[in-house]
Amino acid sequence: MDYCPGGNKTVKKTYLIIALAVLFLVAEALIFYPDYDSPRIIKFLILTQVMFAISIGLYFIGRKLDFQQKHRQIFFILLGLAMAARVIMVVGAEDHFYLSDDVYRYIWDGKVNTNGINPFLYNPTEPELAHLQDDVIFPYINHPWFPTIYPPTAQNIFALVYIIGGDGTWAFKLISALFELLTIAALMVWMRIAGIPKANLLLYLYSPLILVEFYLSAHLDILAMPFLICGLIAVEHKRGGLAGIVLALAIMVKFLGLIFVPFFFKKLPKNQRWIFVLTTVLTVVLLYLPYISGSDGNFLGSLGEYLETWQFNGSAYILFYLIFGMNTARIICGSLIVLFVLWYFFKQEGFYSGQFKSYAVFLIFTPVFFPWYFIWIFPFILRNLSPAFIYLSSATLLSYDVFIMFYSAGYWQEIIWLRLLIYLPFYALLLRTGILSLRKK
């Protein structure tokens, strides 16, 4: 199995990297077996961090191999094992959603939509939807007193999911898996165009966060990823119209995609910029039209309540919150996010670094940092290999510590020392990167 005429060292690396990939699968399987039927949160927290450590080992060995030519077979073996990891997560999870119940809201929205009712108009508990309130989906909807928050691309996919699978969760998992596989394919194309080493993809393929959030918990953000990455490809090819359409589709899965709009505009040639703006706006309008009609002007659903009151797993935001209180802290952090994005836009910042830094600032100052929000920055991490954010991609899963007390005592409580374990190393790595950057300058 000597794929490189360089001797025993290369042979050992190829065996070692495959052995690590298999060990990753074993650690993943242990999340579910034994104790298959009940959540074991502490075991989950430990094993996901073990999986992350293994993935880092995979990357450091993989970057020394020639996946483009001499070791292509090894890359495809690793790709196959990464697909096996996804199957293990799906089979192990079955219908267990002990980390999140968001999928039931997705299916509910699809059910409401396919019954000819605007999902932005009523919350699930209202009498107008009483005929849809079943025993399978309705009891598990979180925050049922709020109407939906999810934009039209998401709503249309939810409707498709309900048409395919009815009240079952399997259809959304199937669609989610399809979009994740499309994400991998799009990443491979984009990485080749952007000149990113193939080994960097291992950080994504073997990321515990990806497996947990989109195969175990089935969150919707993965639905935006093929559109976002195709947008990056379209910009590279100077196709403003196509970039506008696909980025709008991503934004209409979740509004987080709005952060990237200024940098798409700036990167495109001048003759393509206004085509990009026009197609972006037109796509958003066309997607929203069916939902604006009959929504009584509330076609943004519960977005306002989310922006005003929600908070979870924040880092810098918590400091402002402790000093100034919730309302002022939200205004300060929101303003800082906008100011930083404008700064990176007007400054001579590169296309990719501007997007990376802008979304990084969002994650630092946002009052709400659910682990699945991290997916939006992942493509840019594959390009710039930020140690701080590579660490955070796994450490943010420790925020599920809130379920330790939830499942044992029935209440929601964050464990302070675990929050410090998430953020102290992250900020230390961020500071180190900043110091090294200044020294280079």
Image: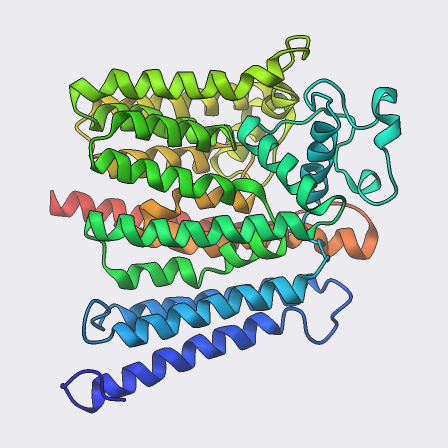
Q: Is residue 70 above or below residue 132?
A: below
Residue 178 in percent (x, y) is at: 51, 52
Left or right of residue 352: residue 164: right
Residue displayed at 63% across by 69% down: 31
Left or right of residue 73: residue 36: right
Residue 306 in percent (x, y) is at: 62, 26
Residue ranking furthest to the bottom: 8
Left or right of residue 217: residue 439: left
Residue displayed at 47% across by 25% down: 333
Q: How is the image coloured?
A: rainbow
Residue 348 in percent (x, y) is at: 17, 28
Quarter residue 417 falls in: bottom right
Say how many tags the image has: 0
Q: Quadrant of the C terminus?
A: top left
Residue ranking furthest to the front: 163
Residue 50 visible, this orientation: no
Quarter residue 313 falls in: top right
Residue displayed at 28% across by 87% down: 12
Residue displayed at 77% across by 64% down: 38
Residue 91 in percent (x, y) is at: 64, 66
Q: Quadrant of the N terminus?
A: bottom left
Residue 202 visible, this orientation: yes
Q: Is residue 113 above or below residue 173?
A: above
Compare residues 398 and 3 and report the one nearer the observer. Answer: 3
Compare residues 347 and 285 and report the one nearer the observer. Answer: 285
Residue ranking furthest to the left: 441
Left or right of residue 381: residue 424: right
